[in-house]
Amino acid sequence: MWKLIATHKLGDMQAVYGMDSETENPELVLLPADMEYREAKREKPYGDSLVQIKIAGDTYPGGYAGGNTLRQGQSVLDFRYREQNVIVNEGQTDICTILEDHRNYKIKHHLTFREGEKTLRSYCIFSNEGKERATLELLSSFSLGKISLFMEGDGHDTIRMHRLRSVWSMEGRLETRTLEELQLEPSWAGHAVRAERFGQAGSMPVNGYFPILVLEDQANQIYWGAQIAHNASWQMEVYRRGDDIAISGGLADRELGHWMKHVEPGEEFTTPEAILSVCCSPDQEVIFQRLTSALDTETEQGPACEQDLPVLFNEYCTTWGCPSHANIEKIVNRIKGKGFSYFVIDCGWYRQNAVPWDIAMGDYKVSEELFPDGLQKTTDLIRENGMRPGIWFEIDNVGCKSQAYQETEHLLKRDRQPLTTTMRRFWDMRQPWVQEYLTEKVIGTLKKYGFGYMKMDYNDTIGIGCDGAESLGEGLRQNMEASLAFIRKVKEEVPGIVLENCSSGGHKLEPLMMSECSMASFSDAHECEEIPIIAANLHRAILPRQSQIWAVIHREDSLKRIAYSVAATFLGRMCISGDVVDLSEAQWKLIDEGIAFYKKIAPVIKNGFTWRYGTEITSYRHPRGWQGVLRAGDDKKAFAVFHGFHGASGISAHIPVPDGFAIKDVYADPDGKGKVTMENAELTVCFREDMQAVGVYLEKE
């Protein structure tokens, strides 16, 4: 029998704690605050612990679980509920549920809530208060039971799973599957566990999937959502035994992430944080944007210069990895006074003997060939023309043509050999020598030349892990923890610096890194047609105010193509690059209009809610149809961005708009401005040609 422990109202959510009266194993259920908890009738009910743990030497779970999941094994069942403590302090509620087993191992499960927020934070602390070493193979950050609470029977065709897939330059594709499609339907006898475990192993946490999981009860319109805030290997699981459904996530376990962790007597280990939310809504976008709202506070507390979402120029797609004082001077003289706040010197500033940028990083000596009078002259030039200078570093990695590549005693190893991928090796960030070296090379450069912006790139992954700990996965976790510590040191020693989180574009778009940075490279999609699709995808994964989107302008671009590129940046942070020195006055006029339009809508990019409409896009490289994105703020302002793809010519695209809004401004190429109408709370754009874009600014009258 299930016994209620406590119910806690947390904003518009509630956390219900209970346990099986025989096993005394506690369970956590999240519900919208206005929904009453009721015990579901099950022929074969199975409880599910609020902590998932596997300790080496304990019996593994049966039911054909081996290789598929480590959940709900003997290690979990041995833990008993002991007590729950609630601390409320300065608007934050911390619910600590304590479990113990017969070996004097203790787990503290923390669920925290900050007043006014739409998310919860969950993490676990394992303490060894026994006499023997404990070796962890799995320890979850969160685990939620009774997802099937309101279903009848096995609830066939009721529950859907949503997740975001990610590959290089095509990030954030939404994948939606029913549990039946995932083969998580219970068997005729209820025997054999069902599990869908996914994640990634390596130092690029968004290499394959975003660390996001959403489950939807279609019949009752309830959504449960979770994110993992971790800059290395992670996993999510949907688990089913009989009719009951549960979800969990955290560090990638021994089977997925090659992770084992020794915890000696008297020691403890803390998991990464998970971000959780639950809501009742007819719109799936609500749960995704509740999850991204978890970083609202962090971004509001970021650098003061970031609060109006300034426009930046990055010279990478102008000089293509070969910046110099001479070409930067030409660029600065062309763009000064046009509304740019940041000027970023990208990769290649350290080039020696004409070695390409992507195999030379690590030594970071200013190129005398490219900057014969030194870098100070260039940064002074940027500041004199009203812009904050920025610089690129690939902090953790070294290129095969650098001297650093040969510093093997300070590089990561696997199987006692330098961990080497094509063109790259990796600093062992755990070493004090490495931290001191990077302090000199990175922080020293930032301070010496007065850089107020740093783009942190990361262009390969360590993979499953490295030597130096009890497992490859633990070596990886420790290394990436030390990498994060260095980023925090940068922020301490260069107060107010603007940090850009980049990893081959979007491979580090997870909450932990995003909480430390002002913005992120949304993708390495610089010039291609799929940019607006990816940019819209990311509204489900990160805050638009943190999503830096490229508009690369070429001298041969038509005005229609320029409007297409510039309008895509309205879906996040505007970053301009390209052949800006050689553009015509007509081309620049359209860019200037785009910058002005962006600054008008920036408050809504910063604080708003997004709806997405249009054709289902199958091929990103060859998109067909159209896309419309509406974003509305809470201050009577909104905007819409339309992109017509191949086959859009002659199509009228319609999106609903809340009552009371009227068109105040339109951004488009000269021939596209007259194709926008508003009638009966419906905004319509008629695409004159394929590959056309229109931005519409709206206000309530």
Image (tube, grey):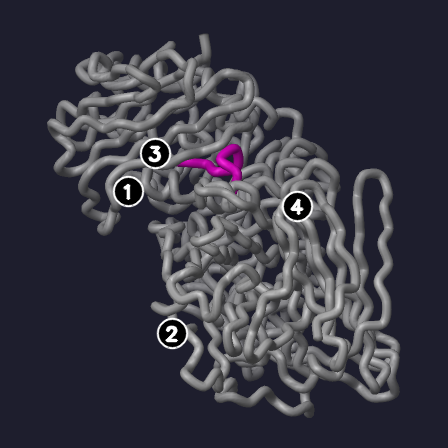
Callout 3 amino acid: Thr
Between 297 and 158, the residue placed more toward the observer is: 158
The local secondary structure at tag 1 comes to loop
Left or right, 117 with respect to 255, comes to right
Q: CA distance from mark 2 to mark 1?
A: 32 Å
**Residue drawn where x is 49% and y is 35% of the image:** 544
Mark linked to residue 530:
1
Percent coordinates x, y for residue 4 in the rendering? 75, 64
Residue density around tag 3, few if under 14, some if 14–19, many if 20 or more, within 10 Å: many
Q: Which residues are magenta?
A: 542-549
> In whole angstroms, how far apart are the C-alphas of marks 4 and 1?
40 Å
Q: Residues within 10 Å of mark 2 (few under 14, many from 20)?
A: few
Which is in the foreground here, disc 4 or disc 1? 4
Mark 4 vs 1: CB contact within 8 A: no
Instruction: Please state, as top left, top right, bottom left or bottom right, where the N terminus lies in the image.
Output: bottom right
> Which residue corresponds to mark 4?
33
Label 4 element class: loop
In this picture, residue 114 sits left or right of residue 342: right
**Label 3 close to label 4 by CB (< 8 Å):** no
Residue, disc 2:
183
Circle 3: element type:
helix
